[in-house]
Amino acid sequence: MKVAHEEIVDIKIHDTQMRENLKSAMHTLQKNRLRVIDEKFNDWQGLRFKAKQAKNSALSSLYDRLLEFEKNASKNGIKVHWANSDINACEIIYNLMIEKKISKILKGKSMASEEIGLNHYLEAKGVKAIETDLGELILQLNNETPVHIVVPAIHKNRYEVGKIFKEKLGANLENEPEKLNAIARKHLRSEFEGLKMGLSGVNFAMSKEGAFWLIENEGNGRMCTTACDIHVALCGIEKVMESFEDAATMVSLLTPSATGQFIPTYNNIISSPRKEGELDGPKEVHIILFDHNRSKMLNDKDYYEALRCIRCGACMNFCPVYDKIGGHTYQSVYPGPIGEVISPNLFGMKENGDILSFCSLCGRCSEVCPVKIPLADLIRKLRAAKIGQGSFGDINPNKTEAIAFKAFEKIATSPKIWNLTISNLHKFNWLLQKGKKSLPLIKKWSVYRNLPQVKYDIYEELEKIQGVSCE
Ligand code: SF4
């Protein structure tokens, strides 16, 4: 069950260990990304542009792309399933397990499976899904959800992981990464023995080739896709691209943006089940193409842009808010800037609209997004939708918020009133302190804020420097 966002922000912002862990991890990811772009790419901006065009072209002909993928994948011997909703997708997997008399599946990392709530669904039906990605395994053992779409347990340091392994797996208390890896490997090897069904996500599906591409760094994904009799892949419909060449453009951007690596450690391109005479590979390959409100986004003239997302996580890594509050605060499978855009679209504004207020609209996310999604603009549009401007599915506009924003609009669009207000704001701090005792809205707003003193001459200086009139 979700708790009020201000409550969880309050808890997380005081979690100094988590903030320390995130700060250090984000710093490394940022540094690595910048280094690899600088050292290995001549025309990073050109590549971003090419990727945006390729993805837009696939999205604008998505219906045809999907049918072409189904035709060619079926020809290759891959069984294609269609799911409208998250529940439909879970049912397909469960029914396959029942049909094949399987009570346990092993999963590679898949945000799609998190999105459809697969683990909980299967658990409620009395069967199991076991995580094999190291980060996901740590979280499953500790009964937690991912905090990040690429590095799900990035909020934990090695000492914390060592404690979890000791407590849940009965291992010796270790904190060296090699030793922790060895514990996880030993545990997972025993799970992989006799594996019947493996589940994976999909990074890109190629309609011309009828194949799909999965990248990973640990090798567990390859175990899930090749060491089993049956491989099931979960694929959001927006992952279907026209050709292998287009998908390769995306992969060139994805790994540097995600972890700062030039290329991924493992590339798995799956084009068919095991053929006659081949010694390994699954006997059956299934792919589930699921919608879950993506078609609705595709039909919106702005939100469709978020369907270009390749789930690299760079927008989170560079967000000045994310590393202060962590991914759990968003209470959605998709946190950070991209989460603020797709969570209200996929899961509903009513449940997810509050996270829109986490954004400072600094625009850093839009700058680093490899596929040029205008995240800050989309967040601003969703904020307007939340207070009843524009059309959006399930909103119940908050009237007080709408009035407050109307008043703000009046002030912010008149330079004279704006200058006058901003230079006198600090004089009202006493009123804020008084009001927060009786007015809950003011109390919420003022927990981490006060009214700053801004000198009017700043604007005069700006006018001089920029030659721009503030009038
Ligand atoms: S929105 Fe852009 S930066 Fe964020 S995860 Fe998606 S592709 Fe990466």
Image (spheres, rainbow, N blue to C red):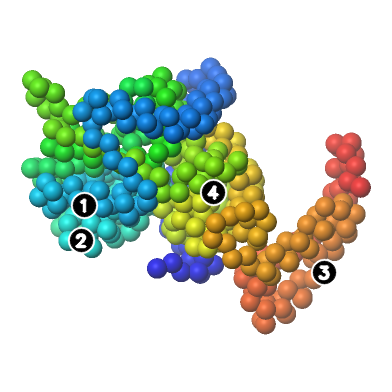
Between marks 4 and 2 in the image, the one whose residue lies nearer the viewer = 2
The answer to whether residue 390 is left or right of residue 282 is right
Between marks 3 and 2 in the image, the one whose residue lies nearer the viewer = 2
Q: Does the CB distance between marks 1 and 4 fall below 8 Å? A: no
**In which quadrant of the rendered view does residue 166 lie?**
bottom left
Secondary structure beneath label 3: helix
Task: Bin the neighbour count of mark 1 within 10 Å (Cα to Cα): few under 14, some 14-19, many 20 and up.
Answer: some
Q: Is residue 81 visible?
A: yes
Q: Amino acid at mark 4?
A: Val
Given residues 25 and 332, the one toward you in this image is 332
According to the image, label 4 marks what residue? 341
Ranked by sequence position, the earlier of labels 3 and 2 is: 2
Residue at the location (88% across, 39% down)? 468
Residue at the location (28% across, 59% down)? 120
Secondary structure beneath label 4: helix
Q: Amino acid at mark 1?
A: Tyr
Task: Bin the neighbour count of mark 2 within 10 Å (Cα to Cα): few under 14, some 14-19, many 20 and up.
Answer: few
Task: Bin the neighbour count of mark 3 within 10 Å (Cα to Cα): few under 14, some 14-19, many 20 and up.
Answer: few
Q: Position of residue 325 (x, y in %)?
A: 50, 57
Ranked by sequence position, the earlier of labels 1 and 3 is: 1
- In the rendering, which numbered label is found on residue 94? 1
Task: Bin the neighbour count of mark 4 within 10 Å (Cα to Cα): few under 14, some 14-19, many 20 and up.
Answer: many
The answer to whether residue 129 is left or right of residue 202 is left
Q: CA distance from mark 3 to mark 2?
A: 60 Å
According to the image, label 2 marks what residue? 125
Q: Does the CB distance between marks 3 and 2 fall below 8 Å? A: no
Secondary structure beneath label 1: helix
